[in-house]
Image: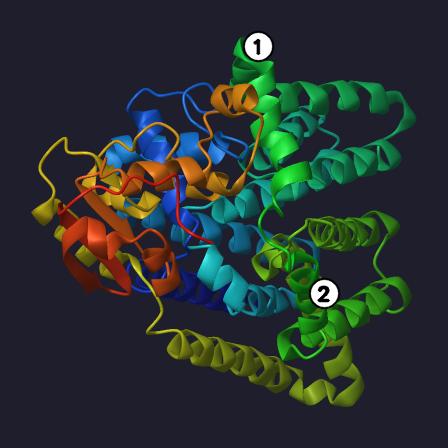
Amino acid sequence: MQNRSSTWFLLCSALLAAVLLAYSQTFAFAWDEGFHLLAAQLIKQGRRPYLDFALAQTPLNAYWNGGWMRVFGDKWRGIQTMDALVTTSALMLAAGFLRSRWREQSGWGTVALLLAGASPLVFEFGTIGQAYAIGLLMIVLAFRLATDCVRRNRTLLAAAAGFCSAAAAGSTLLTAPAAPVLLLWLIVCSPRQARWSRIAAFAGGAAIAITPILVLVAESPQRVIFDMFRYHMFYRRSDWPGSTRHDLEIFASWVDSPRGIMFAILSASGLWFILKKSGWDHATRREFYLAGCLAAALGLYVSTAHPTFVQYYVFAIPFLAILSAVGLYAIAMRLSPARATWLAAGVSIWACMGLAKEIYDKREDQSWPRMEAVARKVDLVTAPGAPLYADEHIYFLTKRTPPPGNEYISSHKLRLPKPLSEMVHIVPQPEWDRRIMAGEFATVETCEEEDWIKKRKLTEIYKQREEVSECTVFWDRAKTLAASGPED
């Protein structure tokens, strides 16, 4: 029975990896991914985040991607291949935890794998060049290492857990709660005589993970602190008057989300079963409680981001899947123990069918192959070295260096005092508009709406215009306009 369970687990893992890989090479795309891959490309070229260009993120994911670019070249396909494999590994580790702690029902680890793998959030965002994949792997690894530290009485594993949890936060601050939750759990669950050594080990591992960040802080603390913290605390909602309403809509969306309701009901059932019916020893139960605490902490934390986005909740899914598989087992045992396997199969198939429908509904959305068509057009009409104003994706695909300050287009919305703006490498949009209307750029590429184009009078400045894959390319300057910026 154990061998058959392992076979099914490996087969489902291989199938999940294959499907994630296929998706990563076709439909996987997020608009912000262009900024992340461009940052990695610039790092590969020798430029330093914060010190040489704006990077409103913690930098380890950019270093990670930059490292893989040295292997695969400056190709989005190579990066997304690695992300698909990393996400698969994270889900296998989460499901493997359930299998290792519940050996008599190890087949339910496969159910946890399928519940997590069939999540659209995991599929859509675990396969792109942003920090979701590496963040998932690092927090699940940290969870496994922390639980093994206590179970096996190995203090060195506390150092590894600290390293992984800090590496996750160093890749994306959306995972920041994992480190304090894991450390607190280690303190509570470790023998009294081992607590201080494990605190020191955890902190030491964390310090090693964030050493690249500490080096940057030592060189320019103001720049690093602005990009990593002040930008998100004070400026993310700049030029977005409806951001609070957007956040409320995100919270409300969970109410009519069948998948969200499923995770909530099954996770609650799982916790009830673990507490009342499992018969597990206290050491095992508290490991599952840790999974619940991580899911709750991560979910509550990302809810405080303003604006928040639904994909931020992806980091809670591996831990919810562990509890949901247990909850599904508990429900199956109450309804029909003889048909528990069929119920698990039915729920898993329903989840996979829902995922397939969501992917199909988004098949016409923007994608990397479509952006490559835009990049080919830009390359065709723009001489080598000619000044180019474009989206981050186009700079990355054409391997053209963006003008200083245009490495992160979302930063254009900020209106900072001039000395601060210059220090953190942010050029406000009115200055870019002035330069565009002065005819400074040989080519302008944008995926903005027609109103954006009209306000900047691009049809007057350039003789040639072509729409490619929902974006527009302008070239062949006709004249310059003496204007300070677009009309309101």
**Amino acid under disc 1:** Ala
* Residue 116 pos. (x, y %): 57, 64
* Residue 440 pos. (x, y %): 23, 35
Q: Nearer the viewer, residue 469 or 39?
A: 469
Which residue is depicted at the point 25% across and 56% down?
371
* Residue 28 pos. (x, y %): 37, 60
Which residue is depicted at the point 54% across and 19% down?
419
Q: What numbered label is drawn on residue 278?
A: none
Q: Quadrant of residue 387?
A: top left
* Residue 401 pos. (x, y %): 25, 31
- Mark closer to the chain start, 2 or 1: 1
How many dots with numbers? 2
- Determine whether 237 is above or below 183 in the image: below
Q: What numbered label is drawn on residue 218?
A: 1
Structural distance between the alpha carbons of marks 2 and 1? 39 Å
Is residue 456 visible to the viewer in this orientation of the structure? yes
Which residue is depicted at the point 29% across and 41% down?
436
Q: Quadrant of residue 449?
A: bottom left
Q: Nearer the viewer, residue 198 or 453?
A: 453
The residue indicated by pointer 2 is 248
Residue found farthest to the front: 482
Q: Nearer the viewer, residue 389 or 20?
A: 389
Please identify the quadrant where the N terminus is shown: bottom right
Which residue is depicted at the point 39% across and 66% down?
15
- Determine whether 141 is above or below 21 in the image: above
Mark 1 residue element: helix
Q: Quadrant of residue 52?
A: top left
